[in-house]
Amino acid sequence: MNSATPFRKSYDMAGLRLLMTVDAVGGVWRYAMDLAVGLRAAGMELVFAGFGPEPSQERRAEAEALGVLEWCHAPLDWMLDEEAGLDAVPEVISGLVEKHGIDLVHLNLPSQAVGLKVPVPVVVVSHSCVVSWFAAVRDAGVPRSWEWQARRNLEGFAAADVSVAPSRSQAALLERCYGPIRGMHVVYNGSRLSERYTSGEPFVLAAGRWWDEGKNGHVLDDAAGAFDWPLVMAGANRSPRGDVVELRNADHRGELSFAETVGLMSRAGIFVSPSIYEPFGLAALEAARSALPLVLADIPTYRELWGGAAIFFDPADPIALAAAVNRLVADPALRAQMGAAARERAALYRPEAQTEAMLRIYGDLCAMAALPSER
């Protein structure tokens, strides 16, 4: 497993055409757009292949400002009950590779590599998956009806030229679930959100897809009744499949735009993430760039990324969460100290480091495939 430290930029990728798969449901969109800014600056030409529910007009415009957006009207693996729903995915991707003269393929779901026959290198990035979600959230394997998910992801990793995880903790979890993965790299996510200082208003902020059991919204909502400051929760509590998580003690604002969520981060006094499953956690990084003190679930990913720069709590214990929040509420000096520590740590997760790491991976593949990496 390779180090997550920034690589030196070794290859001129100007003029190469990259196809990147995206979706508008989870954090992949923010990851893809932030990375795309750096790749464009390096001279790459981008084609985004969208899967799953269609994006908002705002998101369409964001992608189209960086490259070509092709929405494929094909499903995401975790939204399906039957594997047959993915049968058309390889043909869709290979068609776009041919249509746009693509030099490299970057897939943000390992399952999308299964059955894909293209004459160019393929990178898969595993931001999350059903199998590792069940391992982390329920300490169990997938249900029998979803065993195809494990097999398909394993085949996808094997089919790729390189696999990438966003943290060492997630890479270790993936290899616990699937066994050794050939060509696994770790590349930390980065955020292009500008550094700022929150105005520190007396409320606690949390942001996430609260319908996802892995985000642990019910424990947060239970704890909020004992917070000395009100809790604002940004993010949907109804899943694309119709599942709902009831929130009774928080000020739930629903699904907000990125700009609206960042606006709350620039005002809040404390940021909380109770997630049980978090392969990286962009929301915590974005909050830290606003110098918000972080109260985070004590899970391997957050310890890896934020150890010494956050206050941790047992994610199964709402009383411990409330105590951690109220400790900060009662101590302005501690809030300032932890906010400064979070902002300092956030500087390690620079978008430039992420871009350089991915360019190194792309460049190595270009060299091996004898593609024209020097133009």
Image: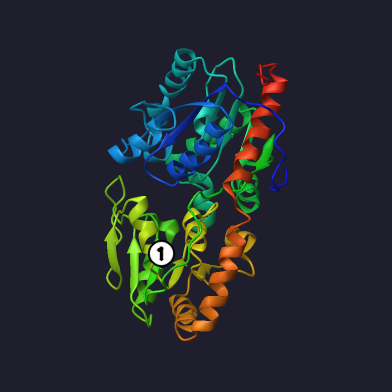
* Mark 1 surroundings: few (<14), some (14-19) or many (≥20) residues within 10 A: many
Q: Is residue 123 left or right of residue 57?
A: right
Decide which of 64, 240 is in the foreground and name it. Answer: 64
Q: Quadrant of residue 224?
A: bottom left
Outermost residue to the bottom: 330
Question: Image check: 195 left or right of 68?
Answer: right
Front-lying residue, 101 or 162: 101
The quarter of the displayed image where residue 179 is located: top right
Residue type (three-letter) at the residue carrying disc 1 = Ser
Where residue 203 sits: x, y (%)?
36, 74
Q: Quadrant of the C terminus?
A: top right
Work out whether 244 lies above or below 164. Answer: below
Q: Quadrant of the N terminus?
A: top right
Q: Is residue 371 left or right of residue 56?
A: right
Front in this rendered view, residue 9 or 219: 9
Q: How is the image coloured?
A: rainbow
The picture places residue 47, in percent across and down from the top left corner, at 46, 25
Residue 15's x, y, as percent?
Answer: 57, 21
Residue 124 appears in the figure: yes
| SS label for mark 1 | loop
Q: Is residue 58 above or below residue 274?
A: above
| Residue identifier under label 1 | 266
**Residue 313 seen from this side:** no
